[in-house]
Image (cartoon, helix red, strand yellow):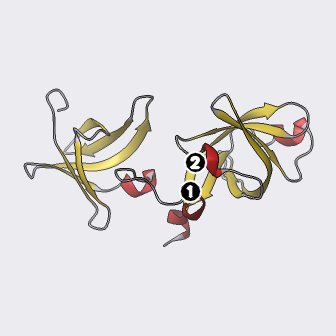
């Protein structure tokens, strides 16, 4: 597995919290319990600045995490991390439930209807409140597919192929 595929973008640092170096972290669904004291996280800025930080303390608060990183003691230290992306390893996250995939595993795979028509490739995954939406680009068009059991019939990551059922209105 390449280093790129080992790290999963798990969320982002929203803003500082308080005056003791804590930050509010917005994580993707189902990952709140995976960040604990002693966890090492990779953080990256929009400009590509990257570092590894060790979690000193993490606690859930209103569906978000409040995190204190070792060596970050002041509000100014926390402010430097504003809007940084948070990355976790696949090992930290553990296996996903059936029917769940990491975004970077889905992007780029070929999409076919259950009738054999090639629609294109997944170019983006949009995280929406009800469910994710896969953006499929191909043949000069873009199709938005809700990531639901009704539409997504099969995902074969080894073969790089997704089979979908197009319900009325998706085309």
Badge 1: few (under 14), some or many (20 or more) residues near its Cα, within 10 Å? some
Observer-nearest of 149 and 22? 149
Q: Earlier in the sequence, mark 1 or mark 2?
A: 2
The front one of 60 and 26 is: 60
User: Measuring 39% from the left and 34% from the top, which residue is drawn there?
Assistant: 131
Which residue is located at x 92 percent, y 44 percent?
Answer: 73
Q: Residues within 10 Å of mark 2 (few under 14, many from 20)?
A: many
Where does label 1 land, which residue? Answer: 93
In the picture shown, does residue 27 fall above or below 95? above
Q: Which residue is mark 2?
A: 10
Q: Quadrant of residue 6?
A: bottom right
Q: Nearer the viewer, residue 51 or 23?
A: 23
Residue at 34%, 50% (x, y): give it. Answer: 99
**CB of mark 1 within 8 Å of CB of mark 2?**
yes
Q: In the figure, is residue 62 to the left or right of 155?
A: right
Above/below status of 158 relative to 151: below
Residue at 92 percent across and 40 percent down: it is: 74
Residue 93, quarter of the rendered image: bottom right
Image position, residue 121 (x, y; %) = 28, 51
Give 103 or 100, whichever is nearer the viewer.
Answer: 100
Q: Position of residue 7 (x, y in %)?
A: 57, 60
**Judging from the image, what secondary structure is the residue with disc 2 in?**
strand
Q: Position of residue 27 (x, y in %)?
A: 60, 41
Q: Quadrant of the C terminus?
A: top left
The answer for how far apart the CA atoms under marks 1 and 2 are is 9 Å
Which residue, as the protein is rendered here, is positioned at the far left? 115
């Amino acid at each position: 597995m390449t280093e790129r595929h080992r790290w999963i973008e798990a969320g982002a640092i929203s803003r500082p919290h308080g005056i003791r170096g804590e930050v509010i972290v917005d994580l993707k669904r189902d990952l709140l319990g995976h960040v604990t004291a002693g966890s090492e996280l990779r953080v990256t800025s929009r400009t590509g600045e990257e570092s590894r930080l060790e979690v000193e303390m993490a606690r859930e608060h209103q569906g978000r995490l409040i995190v204190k990183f070792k060596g970050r003691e002041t509000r100014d230290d926390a402010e430097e991390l504003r809007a940084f992306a948070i990355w976790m390893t696949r090992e930290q996250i553990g296996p996903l439930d059936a029917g769940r995939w990491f975004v970077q595993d889905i992007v780029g795979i070929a999409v076919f209807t259950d009738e054999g028509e090639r629609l294109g490739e997944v170019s983006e995954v949009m995280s929406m409140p009800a469910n994710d939406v896969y953006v499929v680009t191909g043949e000069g068009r873009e199709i938005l597919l809700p990531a639901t059991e009704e539409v997504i019939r099969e995902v074969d990551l080894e073969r790089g192929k997704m089979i979908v059922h197009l319900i009325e209105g998706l085309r």
